[in-house]
Amino acid sequence: MKYLDRPEVRLGDRVRMGDDSGGVVVFSIDTDEYSEEYPKADWAYLGVGVGIKFPKYGLIHFAAKDQDLELISRATHEADAG
């Protein structure tokens, strides 16, 4: 999955949706990246998309681009993804 105006969504990206700017990409089925907290064995069955954990909204699975999803920053290393 890609952002509307950005590159592909990647594990550990910090994102905003609505008034919740604390979202973190915790898995990406599309790039085969999974955090320790959200392992492949639990989420790959969804087939496509990404999982983003928000403080306000909780975990949301996105199977396609969402116009309200905005990249704030990329993860600097794997430790940022968990």
Image: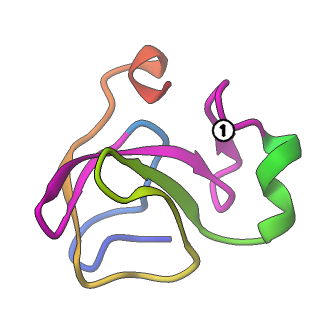
Q: Position of residue 10 (x, y in %)?
A: 46, 48
Q: Report which residue position mark 1 lands on.
A: 34
Amino acid at the residue labelled 1? Tyr
34 versus 64 height, above or below: above
Q: Position of residue 64 (x, y in %)?
A: 51, 83
Q: Position of residue 67 (x, y in %)?
A: 26, 84
Task: Check the image and tell me how it is coloured.
Answer: rainbow
8 versus 40 height, above or below: below
Say which element carries label 1.
strand
Q: Is residue 40 left or right of residue 12?
A: right
Q: Is 22 a magenta residue?
A: yes
Q: In which image quadrant can residue 33 be found?
A: top right
What residue sits 64% from the left and 28% below the top?
Answer: 37
Q: Is residue 38 left or right of residue 41?
A: left
Q: Position of residue 23 (x, y in %)?
A: 31, 48
40 or 77, nearer to the observer: 40
What residue sits 38% from the left and 22% below the top?
Answer: 80
Q: Is 79 a magenta residue?
A: no
Residue at the left extreme of this rendering: 19
Please state the extent of the stretch shown in magenta in the rendering.
Answer: 13-39
Callout 1 environment at 10 Å: few (<14), some (14 to 19), or many (20+)? many
Q: In which image quadrant can residue 46 be found?
A: bottom right
73 or 7, nearer to the observer: 73
Residue at the top extreme of this rendering: 79
40 or 19, nearer to the observer: 19
Q: In which image quadrant can residue 38 be found?
A: top right
